[in-house]
Amino acid sequence: MKSIIITIGDELLIGQVINTNAAYIAGKLNSAGIEVRRVLTIGDEHHEILAALEESYPKFDVIVITGGLGPTHDDVTKKAVCTFFHTDLISSPDARKNIEQFLKSRSHSWSDAAEEQTHVPRGSTIIPNKLGTASGILFEREGKHVIVMPGVPYEMEGMMEDFIVPYFTERNTGKVVLHRTLKTTGIPESMLAAKLGDLKDLLGKATLAFLPSPSGVRMRITVVDPNRSAAETLIRDIESRIREKVEKYIYGADNEELEEIVGRVLAERKLTIAVAESCTGGLIADRITNVPGSSNYFERGIVAYSNESKIRLLDVPEKLIEKYGAVSKDVAEAMARGIREAARVDIGLSTTGIAGPSGGSAEKPVGTVWIGYSYKNETRAVKFQFGTERLRIKERAAQAALELVRRKILRIE
C-alpha cells in the first residue's frame, strides 16, 4: 500500500514549529507494511486541504492528515474533509463519551468548545483520543483510507500506537517492510562504509542507509518481503554480519540512546558514577538523569565552569591550571579524580574544553576538548577536536564522554 502524509499548519510553513509528526508517522506506517511515498505540508486553508485531498486520493491507498481539528476558527480540516466526501458534520455519541471521560480525568467542566469537538463527519469512523478532546477520523472508501488526526504530537502518537498501526497490521496481506537501525559513534561515515566493504555481498536484496548526525552515524537496514518471517530472518542475518565488521562502534539499536546503554552497563556491574563538567555545562548529567532508575548509579554532577570552582570543588591543584591551562590533559585528569574522590563513587568523568566562538589559540583552537576518566588506579584523559560550532561541540563532547565510559567498562579498545 502506498501512502502520503499531509501535515497542516501555518506554524509549520513559517518554521515556527519543527514538523516531527511526519517523521513519526512515516516510521509507524512503515512498521505496518505501508510505504510512504510523499510528505506534504500545507496551510490552514479550506481550499488548500481540499486541493491536497483531490490530488492525493487517486494516487495513494492511504492518506494520513494531521492538524486543524481544534475548536477555533482556523481549524478547518473537518469541514474540508466533509466537502471532499460530500457529507456534513454530526454530533457523535462516541466522541462525546471520549471527551466527557477526558474532561472528568482533568477535573474540567463541559464547555462550548467541548460541544464543538463532538462534531465529526457523517459516515466516518471515530478514532478515540485518550489524551485530548479532538477525535480522530477514518474514512474507508473503495479500498482507500483517509485518516485525520490532531496535530498535537502526543495525541497523534497515541492514536497511531493504539489504533492506526494495529488497524493496518491486521489488514496488511501484501509486502512487509522492516527496518533495523544500528547506532554508532566515534567513527565517520566514510570509514564505516570502508570497513563494511562490498555492500552488494553484505545486503543482497536489502538496503542500507547511512544517516550521519553530530553525535554519530546511524545505519538503517531495510528489508521488503511478502513473508514477515523471512524478512525478520534476513534482517537479523544482515545485522549479525555488520556487527562482525564494526561491532565496537555500535552502542545500540533503533530507539536506544547512549545514556541508556551506559546506565544499563553501570547497573549490571553495580558501579556508580559522578561527573565534573566544564565546557559541556551539565549536558552529560542531564542525559544520564533522563534515564529512569539513574539514581541507582548516578551520584552527582558538578558544573565547575570557572578555574576557582575547579580548585575549590574538585581539589584541582592551582599550579596545574597555571602551568597547563584549564583546557589540558592534567586538569581533565585532576577533575575526574577529584569528582570520584569527593563523591566516593567508582567512576569519575570530566570535560574541559573551548566551546567558542572565542578563546581559542593556535595551540588550543576552538573545539579542543579533554575528557577525563578515573576508575580505581587508572586516571587518564583523551583529547578531541569537535569543530567550531558551540552547541555541536557540547553535544559531541557529551556523546564522546558517555562513549568513553561505555568502552572503558566493557574493555573495548
Image (cartoon, grey):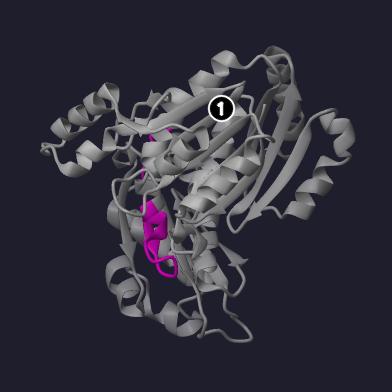
Residue type beneath disc 1: His
In front of the other: 182 or 317: 182
The residue that appears at 31% across and 62% down in the rendered structure is: 302
Instruction: Report the magenta residues as a range.
Output: 267-286
Q: Position of residue 62 (x, y in %)?
A: 60, 31
Q: Position of residue 330 (x, y in %)?
A: 49, 70
Q: Is residue 14 above or below residue 195?
A: below
In the depicted structure, whether residue 246 falls above or below residue 13: above
Is 279 inside the magenta-drawn segment? yes
The number of callouts visible is 1
Looking at the image, which is closer to me, 230 or 372? 230
Question: Is 96 on the left-hand or right-hand side of 1?
Answer: left
Relative depth, front residue between 207 and 134: 134
How far across and down, in percent of the image, does residue 87 sit? 44, 31
Q: Quadrant of the N terminus?
A: top right
Whether residue 406 is visible, yes or no, is no
Where does the image place residue 326, in percent across and percent down from the top left? 45, 77
Q: Tell me the residue that label 1 is attached to.
A: 145
When the figure is inspected, residue 53 is found, relative to residue 177, above or below; the finding is: below
Q: Secondary structure at mark 1?
A: strand
Does residue 184 appear to the left or right of 400 in the view shown?
A: right
Whether residue 357 is visible, yes or no, is: yes
- Please give the name of the residue rendered at 71% of the width and 29% of the height, measured from the top-left corner: 239
Dot 1 alpha-carbon crowd within 10 angstroms: few under 14, some 14 to 19, many 20 or more: some
